[in-house]
Image (spheres, rainbow, N blue to C red):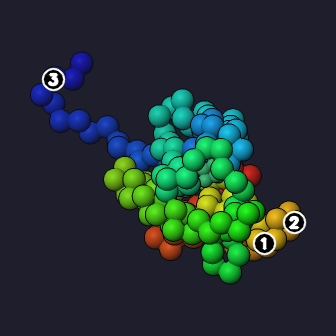
Amino acid sequence: MSRPDAPDFSPVISPILVSACLAGVACRYDGGASPHPEVLRLLAAGRVLPVCPEVLGGLPVPREPVELRQGRAVGRSGLDVTEAFQAGAQRALARAREHGCTSAILKARSPSCGPGQIYDGTFSRTLVPGNGVLAALLKQSGFAVLSEEEL
Ligand code: SF4
């Protein structure tokens, strides 16, 4: 048995940043969630930090769908929400750093979270190479980033 004043040498494991919708949070644009079994398992083990950058940026749930076009985040109506996307991504990065995260599991194809592939901004379900706003920021900041489809 360890003494109460004994130093604690147990390893500190930093959590993995995850898209909150993968952890079962109903924060998607359509008011739903996208729970993923492996992310839920990591959540139950206390190994993840769920964040939704669009909600952190002040956008409501539900909200209109957004795609990235020429570096801007634009809703189907034409509403430009680039500032909210960028503010939310910065807040998510700050939160990740506060918790010592160095890796992330992010929702595939999201204009905020999608790593490596996103829709092309025409709302025609056409995919192109690219990163969502948060995925790009995390990659630039040295994080290891995967989508849930790469687990
Ligand atoms: S912004 Fe990211 S976390 Fe939020 S609903 Fe979209 S994919 Fe999920």
Say whether marks 1 and 2 touch (CB < 8 Å): yes
User: Mark 2 sits on what residue?
Assistant: 124
Q: Percent x, y for residue 66?
A: 70, 61
Q: Name the residue furthest left.
A: 5
Badge 1 residue CB within 8 Å of ligand 1: no
Dot 3 or dot 1: first in sequence order is 3
Residue 98 appears left or right of 26 = left
Residue at screen point 21% across, 23% down: 2
Q: Percent x, y for residue 55?
A: 53, 50
Residue at screen point 38% across, 59% down: 94
Query: Where 14 sits versus 128, above or below?
Result: above
As rendered, which of 14 and 114 lies closer to the eye? 114
As rendered, which of 56 and 1 lies closer to the eye? 56
Quadrant of image for the N terminus: top left
Residue 120 is tagged as 1
Question: Mark 1: few, some, or many residues within 10 Å (few <14, many ≥20)?
Answer: some
Q: Name the residue furthest bottom.
A: 70
Question: Mark 2: few, some, or many residues within 10 Å (few <14, many ≥20)?
Answer: few
Q: Amino acid at mark 1?
A: Asp
As rendered, which of 148 and 95 lies closer to the eye? 95
User: Mark 3 sits on what residue?
Assistant: 4
Q: Percent x, y for residue 93?
A: 44, 60
Secondary structure type for disc 3 = loop
- Which mark lies nearer to you, 3 or 1? 1
Q: Amino acid at mark 3?
A: Pro
Q: Work out how far the residue at label 3 is from the one at label 1, CA to CA, in angstroms.
A: 58 Å
Badge 2 residue CB within 8 Å of ligand 1: no
Residue 59: in sight, yes or no? yes
Residue 143: in sight, yes or no? no
